[in-house]
Image (cartoon, grey):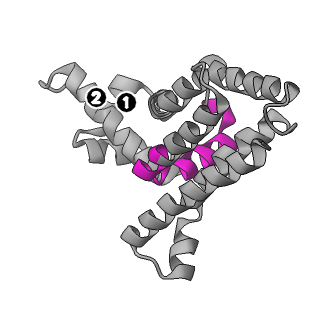
Amino acid sequence: MSDENPQCTEQKIKEAARKVFIEKGFDGTTTRDIAEVAGINQALTNYYFRSKEKLFRLIFEDIYREYFQEIFSIMAQPLELRVKIPQLVEAHFSLFHQNPDLPLFLLSEMRRHPDLLTPPSKDRPVFFFLRQLQQAAAEGQIRPVAPMHVLQLVMANIQFMYLSRPITMEISDLDEAAHADFTRRHKDIVIDMLMSYLFIV
């Protein structure tokens, strides 16, 4: 055991694990990788978290809860859709702009290891948002479109910008700063497209 405060050691391991898991995924990560990034020995990593699987579950749930907290908060608020939808697009953009590798990590790991991933609370704010869309469509406030199509349009149009970043930068000969500007302009187009499509009047 190290003389370092156990809470500090545990936090150091978690921070290292988050970095390595997002970079390499579950399959590409070893506890040795995590220990090296944390600057501790592998035995100490195993002592605190027992297995790579347990640590991965913990990290995924932390990421899911922490990163999507703002998005879920917006979904749950009693806001008009004309206000809520632009806020959701902005929140998605902000989330992935600050964490550009996050979409690939989430999609890859949810596909490869669904048994290891248990997002907390079944995302009840999502269901609130979907019911709000359904009610608005029934009342003629928005175009009669299935709520999941709207949710897909919000998520996909932002997330794909970051999934396709290497291709976009290569095709358009963009550096990081130019790509950041491109994504900001694209975000505004997505908001305009969604609002123009949904709100007929």
Query: Which sits earlier in the primary sequence, circle 2 or circle 1?
Result: 2
Q: Amino acid at mark 1?
A: Asn
The numbered mark at residue 180 is: none
Q: Quadrant of residue 130?
A: top right
Tell me which segment is drawn in magenta: 94-116
Q: How far is disc 2 from disc 1 in space, using C-alphas?
A: 14 Å
Residue 9: x %, y % from top left: 23, 28
The numbered mark at residue 11 is: 2
102 falls in the magenta region: yes
The quadrant of the picture occupied by the C terminus is: top right
The numbered mark at residue 46 is: 1
Q: Image check: 78 left or right of 16?
A: right
The quadrant of the picture occupied by the N terminus is: top left
Residue 91: x %, y % from top left: 50, 40
SS for callout 1: helix
SS for callout 2: helix
Q: Image check: 1 left or right of 105?
A: left
Which residue is located at x 57 percent, y 38 percent?
A: 88
Residue 2 in view of the camera? yes
The count of marks equals: 2
Relative vertical location of residue 179 with respect to residue 137 in this rendering, above or below: below
Residue 33: x %, y % from top left: 36, 48
